[in-house]
Image (cartoon, rainbow, N blue to C red):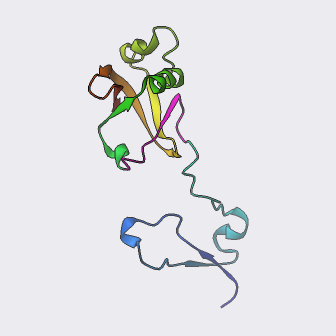
């Protein structure tokens, strides 16, 4: 047969779980594979891909959060301060200007930065029952 490359799929879907991955055989020299192939060295889940500003938050309790139409986060006062610093709430107009001017920012899973969504601030209010700030955002 001769020499060939065994290429594996980069990503497998949920229906492929438990199945053995099928390699694709590509002979040396075909399609310029010897000189032009690029292969990732990792999964890129820790590499941000959207422009900021960013707010990193622990999303591990809700792995499906990126499929929601909006996001509600309960933040402590210190987390709200960090939110304001991260998304530019300390600039002209403060946090209210984010809402009024419809400025967008990116919420990222703090452990997997590639898991992110661009959003717009809808509301900030004190949740007396939980003793935390409720920050509501709509995804764009």
Q: Position of residue 112 (x, y in %)?
A: 52, 47
Residue 120 place in picture, x, y as percent = 38, 26
Q: Is residue 125 above or below residue 63?
A: above
Image quarter in which the N terminus is found: bottom right
Asked if one can make out residue 64 in the rendered structure from this viewpoint, the answer is yes
Residue at 42% x, 78% y is 19
Q: Is residue 139 visible?
A: no
> From what the image shows, is residue 89 above or below residue 8?
above
Name the residue at 49% across, 64% down.
11
Question: Exactly how many numbered labels are in the figure?
Answer: 0
Q: Is residue 55 magenta?
A: yes
Q: Which residues are magenta?
A: 49-63
Q: Quadrant of the C terminus?
A: top left
Considering only vertical position in the picture, is 23 above or below 43?
below
Place of residue 90 in the rendered image (x, y in percent of width and height, measured from the top left): 52, 14
Task: Locate residue 15: give its quadrant.
Answer: bottom left
Residue beneath the point at 38% across and 47% down? 61
Q: Is residue 41 left or right of residue 15?
A: right
């Amino acid at each position: 047969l001769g020499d060939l490359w065994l290429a594996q799929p980069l990503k497998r879907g949920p229906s492929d779980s438990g199945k053995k991955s099928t390699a694709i055989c590509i002979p040396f020299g075909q399609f310029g594979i010897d000189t032009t192939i690029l292969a990732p060295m990792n999964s890129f889940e820790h590499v941000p891909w959207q422009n900021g500003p960013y707010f990193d938050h622990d999303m591990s309790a809700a792995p499906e959060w990126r499929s929601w139409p909006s996001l509600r986060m309960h933040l402590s006062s210190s987390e709200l301060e960090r939110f304001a610093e991260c998304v530019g709430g300390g600039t002209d107009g403060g946090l209210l200007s984010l809402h009024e001017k419809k400025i967008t920012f990116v919420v990222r899973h703090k452990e997997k930065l590639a898991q992110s969504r661009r959003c717009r601030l809808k509301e900030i209010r004190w949740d007396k029952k939980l003793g935390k700030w409720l920050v509501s955002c709509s995804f764009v």
